[in-house]
Image (cartoon, rainbow, N blue to C red):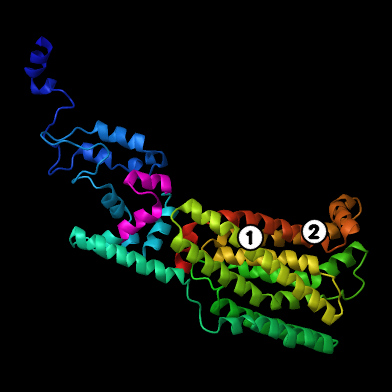
Amino acid sequence: MSEFRTASSAGPEEAVPDAPTTPASPGSWDTRSEEVLSDAALTAGAAGSDARAGSRAADVPAVKGKARRPGGRRGAVDPVKALMHRHRELCERAVDPLEIAAGLEAHGVTDRTAARFRHRDVFSLAEEMYARAERDDESASGASGGSSASALSQSAAQAAGPRGPVGWAAFALLPGAGCALAGVAALDLTSGSAKLFAGVLGALAVGVALRVALRQGPLRVFGRQVPATRAWTGFLLAYALIGEGLLDGVLSGGPDGPWPLHTAPLLGLALAVAPAAWCARVFAVQSARTLAVSRGLDDFAAAVRPLLCGVFAVFLAVLTGLLLASGAVLGEGTRGVGPAVALGALLLLARLLEVHGFPDAGALMLGAACAAQTLALATALGGRLPGFGFLSAPVEGVASAWGPGAVPVLICGGAAAVLLAHAMRRLTRASAHAEVAR
């Protein structure tokens, strides 16, 4: 009893620190309120558990005369409203809750973090943020009813998948038709200087057709692009045409004249633009539908992984068939099929990553493949110098065991494997499909 009287008679400077006091700043927002809504409290993944949320609520003293519910939301402290303030631009420009969910996931908000805001997952948190951003000035009852209808309508619209440009399938057939008519036919029917002239015209025609196909179909890139990607792609296609014959001639002591050109791989790759666009379209549509019905980020990633693997496997199977058919028609047999399959896999994965907002990884792997193939040719030539035979030993070993075509298979296949592992991480995120679904 004496201790209680002593504490009661103490001066202001000796007051109990946890006693209710006048806020230090104007209004009801004081330092303790800032601690409740600090950046660490809003974004930390570990704060998603109910136990830690309850302990933080217990540390904040209750208002005199009012009972405070453990873990409840105070009128002056609204975590969801604070989160909306931090992502104000995202909430203002969002056209559906799925775009907000993708943006939150891109900023590191997970399902565990959503539990801090009393939501079971990021998608339900995004629905509340979308409804409150559009109807913040309306009554609570009208906002709740309107948000449910808006969310249902937006989910139904997204379930239909993203809209594609009209006539994209016809544009996707242009590279194959241009390569068959202007390139292959001209090279096989001409000779001498006319053959060189026809080859240049055919390359230009195929380049224009490929540019039109990539700009008008599912392979179109809306975001940032890496300009060097075009140069790396052109080098790899040129190597598919002349690289294997040049490397074979260098390793055999030549070349003693013009080395053979392999036009079947280029024809097969040009024809494969159409199935590549179809695979990209299927992946975008099915991912958008999965995003519309998913209730968690982990569920969405688990559903998209087999979809990506299936689309990739279908493309490889179709590409292999086109390459075999091209070789049979042009009389080249199965030569160059392995390197072209590896190159096609690398180009498709790089383009998918670029379409969905990750262009750097594809450009890096394409550049690495170009550097590795250039290094292989350089070491093969350098090994012919006296005392430098060790330089060409790795390339000669691979070529003698599996043929000169094994060098681009190992290079492009290794780069494609790295890109596939990277795509499994990037393309299974909800943020990777926000713009495509929109």
Q: Of the numbered discs in the image, which one, if any, rests on residue 309?
A: 1
Please tell me which residue is depicted at 18% across the width and 39% down the height of the picture.
Answer: 30
Q: Is residue 205 left or right of residue 42?
A: right
Q: Of the numbered discs in the image, which one, if any, rests on residue 246?
A: none
- Amino acid carrying label 1: it is Cys
When asked about the image quadrant of residue 319, the answer is bottom right
Q: Of the numbered discs in the image, which one, if any, rests on residue 376?
A: 2
Q: Is residue 129 magenta?
A: yes
- Amino acid carrying label 2: it is Ala
When asked about the image quadrant of residue 438, the answer is bottom left
Q: Residue 432, how many percent across, how many down?
A: 49, 61
Q: Is residue 201 left or right of residue 75?
A: right
Q: Is residue 265 left or right of residue 212?
A: right
The foreground one among 59 and 371 is 59
Residue extending farthest to the top is: 2
Question: Which secondary structure lies at badge 2?
Answer: helix
Please tell me which residue is depicted at 67% across the width and 69% down the height of the picture.
Answer: 233
What is the CA distance from the residue labelled 2 to the residue labelled 1? 31 Å
CA neighbours of label 2 inside 10 A, class few (<14), some (14 to 19), many (20+): many
Please tell me which residue is depicted at 68% across the width and 56% down the height of the picture.
Answer: 417
Question: Which secondary structure lies at badge 1?
Answer: helix
CA neighbours of label 1 inside 10 A, class few (<14), some (14 to 19), many (20+): few
Please give the range of residues in magenta.
110-130
Q: Residue 166, how many percent across, how many down?
A: 51, 83
